[in-house]
């Protein structure tokens, strides 16, 4: 299993929390613990050319196994492991303890998602596209070790967190997300939101990069590399649903600070997605869309289209890319989903000609 020495500190903190949970549950005379096991398997078959790479292949996109335990009615823990087909490594995707507090507040401690962006904070299991957009993949931060406070109350969803550096010795990132949904019914949704994060880099090398709709492709949209002291990003989000039709979009801006010469590189990304569920709808809760469901059953079919754009150019260095993805998602049962998507991209690398790529992918997703 691939781990890091600092991860032991996280495990120690969680171990203390779990010990407290057992004692608290016993004092409450509750039947504890309650266990849950879950997992997901995703297999891809694809054909691509251009910047996506040439040829036809298949791959194990995701093999995930997890477990959760509920110690008391307001205290639980979760561990999720990812298996990498190429490297044969096992890595920790999620390791957290959750405390349910009064007034619909939750506290999470451990390796968790950073509260930045609608698409990034949506489960990969329920995305309209097979991968996240260029903008989200490049700008949104990955999971970090930290502490997160979340509130889901009435029309508002709020979350804020502090996260630690690689050595887990000091706080290096602050992040927050606020969502207002003035319309939130079974068949109608209107959603506005915003996110921000600020991270101290300590003169680390920084570079934006993304591989687009095909995870096995090389990073074909890239910025130049910078020695930066800090990075700040803002995002504005919009989502809407009326019956079977739903849409969401985000605009993201990211700026570096402390670059040699006083320069402040600025990057920009945006995406928009529309989906139509035949004889069904998208679920929505806690500030994000969930899975698509049929009107009278779990099975559903959704047609989707997505456009994304990323400007990673600064003073003539770096790329500008755009990508279009069109697809069909078939939720066969609660546990089985089939997706078929075609995609294409154009990338400007500063030269007179554009680099292009196109492809198609079929994915089988089995979850339990």
Image (tube, rainbow, N blue to C red):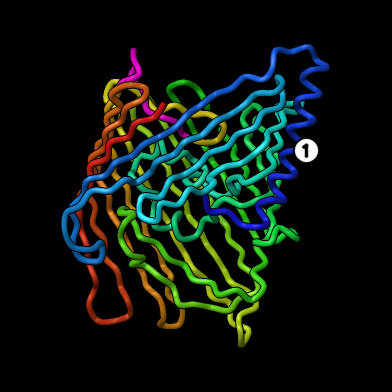
Q: Quadrant of the C terminus?
A: top left
Residue 137, by quadrant, is bottom left
Residue 304, by quadrant, is top left
Q: Secondary structure at mark 1?
A: helix
Q: Residue at x 47, y 67 (%)?
A: 208
Drawn side of residue 161 relative to residue 247, left or right: right
Residue 24 % position (x, y): 80, 23
Drawn side of residue 259 relative to residue 211, left or right: right
Residue 217 % position (x, y): 30, 60
Drawn side of residue 285 relative to residue 101, left or right: left
Q: Residue at x 41, y 31 (%)?
A: 241
Residue range corresponding to the magenta coloring:
289-299
Is residue 225 on the magenta stretch?
A: no
Residue 338 % position (x, y): 26, 33
Is residue 297 on the magenta stretch?
A: yes
Q: Residue at x 39, y 57 (%)?
A: 134
In this rendering, is residue 328 above or below 234? above
Residue 327, by quadrant, is top left
Query: Which of the two residues, 317 or 219, is positioned nearer the viewer here?
Result: 219
Residue 275 % position (x, y): 32, 36
Query: Which of the two residues, 175 or 82, is positioned nearer the viewer here?
Result: 82
Q: Residue at x 39, y 30 (%)?
A: 367
In this rendering, is residue 205 above or below 152? below
The residue carrying mark 1 is 16
């Amino acid at each position: 299993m691939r781990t890091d020495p600092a991860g032991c500190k996280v495990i120690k903190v969680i171990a203390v929390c779990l010990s407290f949970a057992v004692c608290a549950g016993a004092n409450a005379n509750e039947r504890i613990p309650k266990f849950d096991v879950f997992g997901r398997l995703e297999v891809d078959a694809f054909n691509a050319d251009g910047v996506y790479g040439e040829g036809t292949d298949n791959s194990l996109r995701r093999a995930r196994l997890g477990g959760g335990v509920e110690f008391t009615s307001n205290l639980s823990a979760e561990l999720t492991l990812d298996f990498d087909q190429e490297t044969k490594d096992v890595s920790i995707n999620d390791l957290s303890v959750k405390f349910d507090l009064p007034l619909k507040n939750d506290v999470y401690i451990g390796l968790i998602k950073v509260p930045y962006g609608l698409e990034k904070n949506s489960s990969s299991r329920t995305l309209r596209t097979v991968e996240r957009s260029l903008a989200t993949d490049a700008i949104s931060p990955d999971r970090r070790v930290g502490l997160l406070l979340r509130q889901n109350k009435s029309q508002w969803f709020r979350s804020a967190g502090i996260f630690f550096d690689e050595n887990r010795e000091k706080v290096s990132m602050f992040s927050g997300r606020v969502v207002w949904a003035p319309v939130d019914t079974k068949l109608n949704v209107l959603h506005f939101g915003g996110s921000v994060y600020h991270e101290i880099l300590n003169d680390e090398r920084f570079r934006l990069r993304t591989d687009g709709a095909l995870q096995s492709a090389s990073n074909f949209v890239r910025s130049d590399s910078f020695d930066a002291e800090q990075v700040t990003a803002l995002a504005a989000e919009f989502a809407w649903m009326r019956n079977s039709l739903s849409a969401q979009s985000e605009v993201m801006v990211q700026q570096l600070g402390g670059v040699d010469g006083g320069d402040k590189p600025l990057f920009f990304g945006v995406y928009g997605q529309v989906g139509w569920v035949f004889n069904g709808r998208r679920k929505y809760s806690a500030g994000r869309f969930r899975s698509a469901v049929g009107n009278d059953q779990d099975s559903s079919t959704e047609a989707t289209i997505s456009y994304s754009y990323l400007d990673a150019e600064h003073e003539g260095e770096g790329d500008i890319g755009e990508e279009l993805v069109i697809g069909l998602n078939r939720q066969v049962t609660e546990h089985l989903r089939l997706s078929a998507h075609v995609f294409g991209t154009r990338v400007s690398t500063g030269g007179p000609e554009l680099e292009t790529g196109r492809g198609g992918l079929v994915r089988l997703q089995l979850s339990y």
